[in-house]
Image (cartoon, helix red, strand yellow):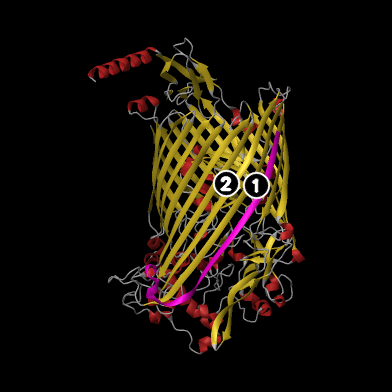
Amino acid sequence: MKKQFTLLVFFTLMAVCSLHAQTRSISGKITDTSGETMPGVNIIVKGTLNGTTSDIDGNYVLSVPEGATLVFSFIGYTAVEKPVGSNSVLDVVMQVDFSDLSEVVVIGYGSQKKSDLTGAVGSASGEELQERPTSSLPQALSGKITGTSVSQNSGKPGGKTQVRIRGNTSVSLDNSPLYVVDGVILVSTTLSDNSSPIDYINANDIQSVEVLKDASATAIYGSRGANGVILVTTKRGSKSGATVSYDSYYGVGKIAKKVGVLNSEQFLMIEEEAYKNAEKYDAVGWASGKYTDPVLKRTNPLLFDSNGKPLYDTDWQDAVTQNAFSQNHQLSFTSGGENGSFGAFVGYTGEEGIMKESWLKRYSSRLVFDTNVKKWLKVGGSLGYNQQYERLIHDSWVGRNMVEAIPMIPVKYPDGTWASNLDYPGMEGGPNPVQVGEEYLKYLRTHTVLGNLFVNMTLAEGLELRSSLGVNYIGQKTEEYAGRTLNFIGTPTNGYAQILNNEFFSWQFENYLTYNKRIGEDHSFTGLLGISWQQTDRSNYNVRVNNFSDDFFSFNNLAAGSVPVPPTSGKTVEGINSYFGRINYGLKDKYLLTVTGRVDGSSKFGANNRYAFFPSAALAWRVSEESFLSESATISNLKLRTSYGETGNSGIPAYGALAGLNSGYTYVYGGSVVKGIGKGTLANSELKWERTKQIDAGVELGLFNGRFAIEADVYAKLTTDMLLNSPVPLSSGYGTVYRNIGSMENKGVELSLNTVNIEKGDLTWETMFNISMNKNKVTALSGGSDIFSGNTIIREGEPVGSFWGWVHEGTWGSDEADAAKALNPTWVPGDIKLKDVNGDGTINDSDKVIIGNGMPKGYGSFINTISYKNFEFSMDLQYTYGNDIMYLTTRPQENRQGIANSLSTVLDAWTPDHQDTEIAQWRPVSAGYDNRDTDHMIQDGSFIRGRNLLLAYNFSSDFLDKISLQRLRLYTSLQNFFLISDFQGYDPEVQTSNTPFGQGEVNFNQYPRPKVFMVGLNASF
């Protein structure tokens, strides 16, 4: 045994020595075409995991075996392969991959070089998205791609967003795009707290995002492509050896802006003046002693001193908000080689809200693998799990009362008891917002699973078959409890507890053939033919009980409540079967053609219209490849393209075309009231797909070797057979039925400009500017009848999102008493003046008109990035113009003096000496205000925002070698660092309405958007 061991050691040493003898050192310098050195270039021995990176001076040293070939790669540059041969020094010059024309872009069911695209496709890499650390993908995507509007409508943790691609295409269905993650179509639905399935995808896991905008690009998704498609590709394993990466940031957020409200002195002064004006506006009530001098009620020693002066002047916005701490940690392990790779990714995100007691915690994990089982067989897949836990505040009462709570009361009295508006006589009595934050309990738990498994088989040269199975599960549970003493919330029912559960499960099975063939030097062909099945199951239940004897159990023991509310539950199943195909043809790599078609069949529609065909075609001409331009020193890229296609929308509920039953009937049987089942919904066998036709023309221009790049598109979209749950005569026995009712058009222009302003030595300055403009118009409605949605109107010839109300013409002056009385017998000087639009001598609903629109005329970004040696600096500005905001809180917070606090704008109210104003004269609420919705509520929603300011430092390779790291980057970031806007509220990029076109509607439940300071690092080894 000892002899055998000695022989083993001997041969092992000989093998090591032999291996050492067969390797040698190779070194060199890497530069670009201008002679500047290039740090950070990856150098790998082809076919192995052996590699290194160039240092800050572009130098590298690497031990290589005999006969090795080195592969040099760097983002934005063409990869270079060079055999070592007998050289000991190997210098390389890297060529810029101008305009990233050879960049591979993911499209539906495949990929293409960017130079070969015929449709309008925008893309953003994971590195670009990481420049602005966020907790959700839509936030990170904001401003990156033209034609893609991302509005962050709330400042709450996780920040809910609204995404629109080239405007709205439907009057009643969801206008959100289709999301496809690693080939898996996400469940299309609005989730609890108005979130979306894409909000639960870990933004740090993203490798790239492609946005399909025109019909040529989206038609491959047929009935679900009308609103655009967003393709998300997540990170995979590494093919260049093992890597461990850690990314982290810490942040502190604070309220960026406060709304102007009255302080104690101002509130009490206005209360006194309002009392003095009561006789003018309510002479009968004044004479009967209805009104009492408010000075006489200021006797509570907990609130006033002996002279009636207030002891407190509480700033409720300060009391409700806080400096909010956030953190994010991401850890990944990747490895592999040419025959396979794998990766494991885990993450944690924790965010405190700037409104106290609100927070979010997210745990994420994902496993991926790709392997070449045989030369002709590839297998891969991924499985991701996310758990998110949130505490939600009562938006309406916390958000409302941090403005309306009166300043003379404290948060708590010295003995620790909560103060309330009720403590000052005559007040409306809204709850203490800090108390609501602490005692109102509402938790949302979300679990998501996203997985896919694929098999890719090479059947013949150029012919591949891919089969994939994908699943998406979303489970949400909302637990809510309002205590017995929680004013306005729990007190009406003596406390209530509620549990709401929603589950969504979707599976898809897809099989498609792809054939690639190049014939000679001039012809290239790619054909795609496939079939797909998808099914989505949805279920929910809601249980609630009232009347608790104790608050101890809250929602943890529903039996503690003595008055159960009838529970509700539901379940639906819907399916879609599809057949799709695409042909890409290229002639001399200059003339490009794409033809696409998809047949979709949905269980949602009537038997007569269950299937529909969605075609598209696109042409592109790479003019810069023509002989008259190919040698141009000025034009490095010029491509013209155009497309036409049709897509659809099937976003109605399951069984929307079928007759249904309703369990909401009751009748008397045997002397008792019992529940029954009867007719619920009316069938429509002719119900068919909503269809959008789109034409697009675009140009891509690169000048001076890609230092100046322009991409512009013009488009027109026409949606017909719009789906709406529209009213029917009540004599039919039904209220509504789903019908195809009209048409809508969108026309727009998109422009992006990328420039390299300076590229000299260690200094680089790049600029990106984009702008998107969209004009919407409803072209036809069934019967021409208006449709009302919240505070907006849908009308033929007008854009959606149009606000509806009366025209405010200021206030009546002292010399206009007769004119005011003629229009309304109760109006006197000091009241608001409304326009008699139709001239009939009275003010009524016939005088209501369109008073504004919440959709912007244009939006975009202006981003500058400067790199100097190891430093990076970027400034990201966002802008929007041409949109209005309907600030609904103006009415109750300017017209309710004496029962709640008011906006500071009421200080500009009408007085005999100040009559040129829009604010009515102060008076007690019971004396009467005109509370109609007018254009006084309409404010300009245009803004310029400092979205992100970033400063980063990348450590040199020399330093990294000393500490055994591949990468180390430190950065600091300031988000939402300034805002230029005339809007009086917290933030102009807001929506509190849940209606389809409620963008710009702002009511009580506002959550202010924070200003956030961050520090972070990116490291790998």
- Describe the element under mark 2 as helix, strand or loop: strand
Q: Pick out the residue farthest to the front.
A: 1
Return the x and y of residue 365 as percentages of the image width and height. 43, 46
Return the disc, 2 or 1, that comes first in the chain's sequence. 2
Q: Position of residue 971 (x, y in %)?
A: 41, 38
x then y, percent, for residue 15: 35, 16
- Disc 2 to disc 1: CB gap under 8 Å: yes
Q: Residues within 10 Å of mark 1 (few under 14, many from 20)?
A: many
Compared with residue 771, is residue 293 higher up or lower down, i.e. above or below?
Answer: below
Q: Is residue 695 left or right of residue 804?
A: right
**Quarter occupied by the N terminus:** top left
Residue position marked by numbered label 1 in the rendering = 221
Q: Is residue 949 left or right of residue 601?
A: left
Residue 665 x/y as whole percent: 59, 78
Most frequent secondary structure within the magenta stretch: strand
In the rendered view, tell whether residue 395 sits above or below residue 472. below
Which quarter of the figure has residue 659?
bottom right
Q: Which mark is residue 180?
A: 2
Q: Amino acid at mark 1?
A: Tyr
Residue that appears at 74% across and 59% down: 608
- The span picked out in magenta is 555-584
User: How many marks do you count on the picture?
Assistant: 2
Which image quadrant for residue 769?
top right
Q: Is residue 561 magenta?
A: yes
Q: Nearer the viewer, residue 25 or 966?
A: 25
